[in-house]
Image: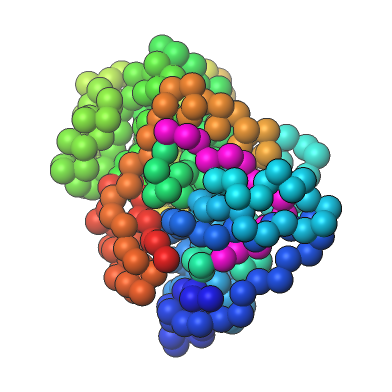
Amino acid sequence: MKAIVLASAIDPIVYQEIEKPHIADDEVLVSIKAAALNRRDYWITVGKYAGIKYPSVLGSDGAGVVVGAGSAVDQQWLHRDVIINPSNNWGSNEDFQSSNFTILGLPAQGTLAEYVKVKAEYLHSKPAHLSWEQAAALPLAGLTTFRALFTKGKAKAGNKILVTGVGGGTGVFTLQWAVAAGCEVYVTSGSDAKLELAMSLGAKGGVNYHSSDWAGQLGKIAGGFDVIIDSALGDEFDKLLDLASPGGRLVFFGGTAGNIPPLNGRKIFWKQLQIMGTTMGSPGDFERMLTFIDQHKVVPVVDEVFPFNEAKAAFEKLADSSQFGKIVLKP
């Protein structure tokens, strides 16, 4: 089969022929119809991720058709259209992942291939209203942000939500979840064009974070926020304390702009703020996300679709953060 292989540190993205996976009794073989990139894939290709091994097939997001099933698997899965939950071995505690937790696409071979093998427990029926490309865009970023917004952030209709750094997959998903839930959503971005696109999806307003007074501008147009979802951290994270309403929840799942600076603890305790980290999500989170997306008929935003043999161009676009929504690849 053809696959996009993390071949070496020098040549990390190689489109080549590799052996088709052999499934165990509790596994299925999925013929991939579409797969999507995440920032995680990029960090791996540039060597800034733990546990990198060569060669590997990357890719955590995938949608396709089950074409093989082990003897211990319910054979009704055969020929079903599915999406794959990439959050593996979460464990029994809803509050945090187990020590055996892994994400599909390293260390296990991922979805950027014509076929992928996964345990049957990680299969879910593809939402009927989504195309293959839209379904492939959903799993990792959708799960991460659904948990951040609802499980951790406790967002509900009428809440005022701030999404920092809208444009990439996680920012757009957070915006879409919050709008569908009846929240009042504001965003930040380094691109005025992306701010306009966010407002076309239902954002009430937004500011460009390159402005020296971006936080002051947000305060003037929106007041305080019940829930703030952030994936950047960095030197200006402390400004989010001022933007949070009393009792507000600040949830983050990334740190692309660096570490958290020293914070004024008095603001945190006096305003009764909660600052929480989150990673991926539990099986329950994934099932609740699918129920939500079916109920509200949310359609993931796909920025561009590339064939597998143009994977390098897809990764280059991911690297320069010019996309709005998800980058998808197809065999």
Q: Is residue 210 left or right of residue 230?
A: left
x, y percentage for residue 203?
27, 27
Residue 297 visible somewhere in the drawing:
yes
Of residues 275 and 310, the one nearer the viewer is 310
Instruction: Tell me the quarter of the picture where residue 14 sits.
Output: bottom left
Q: Is residue 121 found inside the magenta-colored segment of the image?
A: yes
Point out residue 194 in the picture as x, y percentages from the top left corner: 21, 42
- Number of on-image labels: 0
Q: Nearer the viewer, residue 159 or 292?
A: 292
User: Toward the viewer: 176 or 204?
Assistant: 176
Specify the segment rendered in magenta: 115-129
Q: Nearer the viewer, residue 102 or 124?
A: 124
Q: Report whether 18 appears left or right of 166.
A: right
> Which residue is at 68% across, 33% downward?
284
Residue with the most extreme bottom position: 10
Q: Is residue 7 above or below residue 276?
A: below
Q: Which residue corresponds to the image point at 46% horizontal and 57% vertical from the top-left?
A: 33
Question: Magenta span has 158?
Answer: no
Rendered location of residue 3, percent (x, y): 49, 74
| Residue 268 in sight | no
Place residue 209 in its image quadrant.
Answer: top left
Residue shown at 78% from the left, 50% from the top: 73
At 43% from the left and 85% from the top, the residue drawn is: 11
The picture places residue 254, in percent across and down from the top left corner, at: 49, 50
